[in-house]
Structure formats: structure tokens, C-alpha cells
Amino acid sequence: MKNLIVFFSLILLSSVSIFAQIDSNEIKNVLQEAVVSGLQANEKTPISFSSLNQKRISKLYYGADIPTLLLATPSINMYSDNGTGIGYSYFRLRGMDQTRINTTVNGIPINDPENQGVYFNNFADLASSAQQIQVQRGIGTSTNGTSAFGGSVNITTKNLTEKASTNINIGTGSFGSSRFTAELQTGLIENHWMVYARLGQVKTDGYRQNSGSESKSYHFSLGHLGKKSMLKFNFFGGNSNSMLAYTGVDKTTFENNPKTNNFTNGETDAFKQYFNQVQYSYNLGKGQTISASVYFVKGSAPKFQYLAEGWYTFNSLNMQASPYLLSGSSDTLYPGNVMTSYRLNQQYLGGFITYQLQKGKVNFITGLHANTFKSDHFMEVNWANTIPNGIKQNHQVYFNTGYKKELSGFAKFNYCINEKTSLFADLQIRTVSFKYKSKETQYRPNDGKVEDMYWTFFNPKIGSRIALNNLFALYAMAGYSQREPTRFDYLQDDFAPRDIKQNEINPEQVIDLEVGTEFNGSVKGKMNLFAMEFQNQIVSTGALNNFGYPITGNVGKSSRRGIEADLHGKIASHFGFWISSSLSKNTIKELNQTYYNIDQNSDLTISFSNTNLALSPNQIHYLGLESDWFKGHLLVEANFRYVSMQYLDNTQNKDLSIPSFQTIDLQFGFEPKEYSKLGLPRISLRINNLANTKYAPSGSIGGFNSINNNGLIGQNALVFPAANRNIFCTLNWVF
């Protein structure tokens, strides 16, 4: 691993001597994009994918984060903790959460290596710097980081430009929401250098009570352009401070007071995440390009405050030498409420190198990626109603460290048999290791032991594309993919409460079949059929642990099958439309659910067959109309969103479900470009949830996993309320 990182670094440093031989004023975006082109799909790749270009992103983005933008692509459902889309926001693709979605920025994997989640809130306003967002559905093409299961999201930040410009965005809206973003492109300096810089702040008080969030972010790129090469430095990241709102409310509370938030005692968190990247691309000539990147990411959680109500928390933490147990006595000193703070310190270093050959009928791409990761997890007691004499505040309860390493390589091959038919193959080998170490603290012995874990996966794909004519094409792809369980799949907590073996949870496996049609006439886009057949899929039980993470486990066979449409076109000269829809059936073949029988004082296992997978709606539709008037000065856009009923667990219990919902959003844009003597101003007004619908796009399970002799279970449905009618107004000025 170390030798590989050194090799990447030497390639980048060698560029210094190459620059002395280069002299060109011409900017070639292909050199900037070569670093990530090996990870992206193109028009001839036979997979199901959608892309949002910079123009579409700037029209959709007003401050609500990346998951809100992704609604414009098929099979996406999203929600946010505070109901606004600003702050902690999440999405599911084909019913699978973000731990099953590979996400990269400029080729950097941003899924947390241990738990594989993505937290856009840590570096909010990234969409302001986005050149393109590509969403691949299904296992897609090989990429960096954890294997894609539900799909992958590839974000490319803005290219450096030859022309200088300044872009200011100021916005304000309901619930104390606001956005300020300032961007600068210097253009070409002395025929070689270019700079891009952005500073941003997004904040909200939240729709729900005590759910405010504030994020400050930055992005800085420095590039040196040569005749055949491009060296680029990217630095981006942010600081976020949020009031906690990650638990749902029961249905009665939702109906009577949907703004309710269970956290009322000042529970807050703070996260920092900084990304540093060096990219280098060189055109070797004769259709050959080589590119490399080295990255370093630093993250931390200065605080994650959670109020634990009652002394039982310390028993659950196995604090056998707890200061809250009186020495030499069986008596317990009750501390009352305890404010705990969960902390993180993370860093990871990685790099990747890609070689591409485009010659005649052949397009060949191969690449290597390596990554090493370290994460400290620890918890402190900030205060308690009663702390024994001699015990300091902020004493540490536990401390453990996770280590993860990854090495992967891929080869992609596209061969054009003739002008209409091409064949595609993609082979990836990926090896992963995970180690867990804990240290004994003053009042608590070591955690359980976690054995060292190692996995090796082979993920092949093959497909073909046939162009019937200039207007229609067909494609088909079949692939197989595997991925390792997450740290939380094993621990179900922030520490190991017992001894844990690797074989307790099996890696997930999926066979993915995709068949689609491409349209390139007055209607453009794709329609596709998909069948994803899983073995050992890791699914949520519906319950959450103390940190809001879903408790998970393996199931035998399960499947996700459906049809998707991603189409857009013109109805008339001034009217356009788009359709982003999916119909699916998502089932588990057989599930054994264990309950605690409170009448019999014993466990009871009940078997279920062919039940719907949790949080996997059978229908998702996102439909839109747009029109422009007065020579393009006035733009009007309307979006309709519908999501069908969702079960919150995998037993298909209607009492544990959330109903279908539909919303309408409107957006107006005014661009007086012919009347402005200073730059290009644009004013936009967005009205979300025009009909003031009361709805919840997602939920979880509350209560206890119990049952009585009459079959009455002890669990109940919790929902995450979304905001009622709200507005957001933005002034954008480009100079």
C-alpha cells in the first residue's frame, strides 16, 4: 500500500519537469476531466444512468443539498432530518440507502470507509461547484471505493476556465433559511495558470422544532495547463453545526403537531471534513491518456451531544468500575440525566491512476486505486445531574479505533463491431481489510474483541449496445457484484459490546440485469427494465440504535425488479417536459423475524414469505413542465412528485408503514439580460409544497421488538415530517 502511494506521488512530481517543455494557451477540458472519465459512463456505455449538467444543476439548486437535486433522476426518494432539505439530508436509490450507493467527488470516494454512509451536510453547498452529477443505477461501471449496489453518484467539480468571471448567490426563505455563495474564476493567467475559488454558507432554523443547521464551506482549485498536460490542485470541505433531529415522531404526534422534535435539551453536533487532492493528466498521443490523483481527507466530530436519561445507560456501556456504583456496596449512585458526547477523528490517504486508449474501434481503460483509513471513536460524559466527588467532567467512557485498507483494479473494454453495434466488458478485483482496536478506560474495561477481517471480491460486467438508427438504440448489461458489511452491521453500536467474528455477517451479492432503449429525437432519454437478484442482502430491521443508524442483518434471497423512464423533450416552442419515473417490485423471498414474547417470557420466531422490502416504494414519479416567455426573460417551472406507500420493516405490516404522498413545487425565474449594463442578474422564486400537503417521505421503527399471545407487537411507526408550504428567493449575479 505504501509503495503504491509513493508511486502515485512520483508520477505527480514528475510533471514539474514536463512543464518546462510545454507552451499552449488552449484550454482543453478533456485534460481536466480525464482523471474521472475512466469512472464515468458515456453515451456508448450499456448501463442505466442519468446526468445533470451544470446548467440543470444551477437551475435546480437553491440551497437544499445534493439529495434534493437527485430527485430529478429515476428511482430516487429523499428526506431530511429537519424537513427542509437543508442540513442532514439522505436519499435512497431503488430502495437502497446511501451505504449501498457508491459516491465520489472528482474520483475521491466520499463514503465513510467503515460505515459507508455519506454526509453532504459536512461540506454543504458543493452543488455550487458542481460541473456534472452522474447517477448510475444498478451496479454500474467500476469505480473507486466501496462497490456500488443500488447505484453510484459521480460528482465532478467545475472546470477551470479561460474566461474570468464572478458569481454571487444570495438567497433567503422560510424557516430562517438562507444561502450566500461567492465564486471566482480568474481565467488564464500568463498562458498557464488558472484559479477557481468559492466560499459559501447555508443555514436554516429547520421546519421541526430545535432542528437548525448551519454549514460553512469552501472550494479552491489551482491549475497549470500545458500543451499536453494538466496539473490541478483541489481543496474543498466545510464545517457544520446542527441541532439533532434524527428521530421520527409517531403518527398521532405527526397529525397533531408535525413540527415536534424529540430532542429538546440542547442536543447538537459539529462536524468538519476537509478534502485535499492533486490531479495530473497527460496526453501521450496516438489516442492515449494517462492520469493520476492523490488525495488526503481529514474529518472530525468536535461534539455529538446526546442526552441519556437515567443511570441505565452506564449499565448498557458495561461500566463495571463505574464511579456511579458506590465502592464496596451494592448501592447505585443515580446520576440522573447524563449529557454524553460522541467524538470522531478520521483521516484517510489514497490515490488512483488510470490509462486510456482510444484507437479505431477500441476504447480501453484500466486503473488502480488504493486507500488507507483510520478512525478514532470515543465517548465522553460532559455533565450529569450528579457526578461523584473527584470525577472530572468530560471523562472518557470508551475509546476504539477502526483501520481499513482497500486496493482495487479494473479494466474496461469497449469494442465497436461496426457503426451500430458495440460490445462492453468491465472487470474489477477489489481487496479490503478491517481491523478494530480498543483501549481500556478508567471506568470501563476493553470492548469485546473483533477479529481482523479480510475480503477479496471479483466484480464482472458485460454488455452490448445496438444503434437501430439515429433516433433509437438498444442496450443490455449483465453484472455481478459483492460488497463487505459495514462496521455498524457488525457492531450495531459505536463500540464492540461482545466478541465478533467475520462470518457472523455474510458479504452481499447481487446479479444485475439491465435492458434499455435510448431515444434521440424530439423526445430524448432512456427507458429501461432492471432485475436485481440478491443473496445475503443486508437490510434494515426498521429499528434505530442510539445514533440514529438502522439496525441491520442478512436475509437469504431478495429481489428488486422494475421499469424506469428518464425522458425530456419539447411540447411546443415555449414548453418543455421531463419524466423521471419508476415502477418496481421489491421483495424478500423468506424472512425469519424474532420477537420477544412478553406473555411467555421467551423468544418467538415468525416466518414471512414474499414480503415487501422496507422503505422501497413500488412507485416513484417526478414529472415536470417548463416554459419561457418574453424572449426567455421569464422562466416558469412546475414539478410534481409522487411516492407510493412504504413499509417501515420487512414483515409487510400496514401498521408499520407510511402512506403515499404527492407534492407540487413551482419555480419562477426572471433574467433581464438585455437590460442589465453590469453583469447578468437572475432572480428566482421557488415555492415548495404548493398545495401545503402534510406528508412524511421516510420513517423508522419505534418501541420494542416484542409480541404478546394475541399477536400484538410492541413496535410502532415513526415518520420524518417534511415542511409545509415554503418559499425561497435567490438573487444570482454573474459578472
Image (cartoon, rainbow, N blue to C red):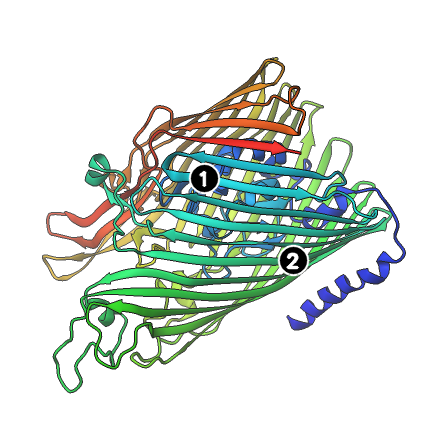
Residue 139 visible in the shown view: no
The answer to whether 5 is drawn above or below residue 507 in the figure is below
264 relative to 162 in the view: left or right: left
712 relative to 510 in the view: left or right: left
Residue 680 visible in the shown view: yes
Disc 2 secondary structure class = strand
For this rendering, which residue is in front, 505 or 245? 245
Looking at this view, name the residue that lies furthest to the front: 677
At 12% from the left and 62% from the top, the residue drawn is: 601
**Closer to the N terminus: mark 2 or mark 1?**
1
Disc 1 secondary structure class = strand
Task: Find disc 2 in the rendering and name its residue.
Answer: 277
At 18% from the left and 79% from the top, the residue drawn is: 325
Q: Position of residue 532 (x, y in %)?
A: 48, 43
Task: Find disc 1 in the rendering and name its residue.
Answer: 178
The answer to whether 600 is drawn above or below residue 417 in the figure is below
> Mark 1 belongs to which amino acid?
Ser
Q: Position of residue 647 (x, y in %)?
A: 31, 41
Q: Quadrant of the N terminus?
A: bottom right
Labels 2 and 1 touching (C-beta < 8 A)? no
Residue count near mark 2 (Cα–Cα under 10 Å), binned few <14, some 14–19, many ≥20: many
Looking at this view, name the residue that lies furthest to the bottom: 328
The answer to whether 570 is drawn above or below residue 234 in the figure is above
476 relative to 662 in the view: left or right: right
> Mark 2 belongs to which amino acid?
Gln
At 40% from the left and 36% from the top, the residue drawn is: 585
For this rendering, which residue is in front, 682 or 647? 682
At 67% from the left and 34% from the top, the residue drawn is: 735
Dot label at residue 681 = none
102 relative to 691 in the view: left or right: right
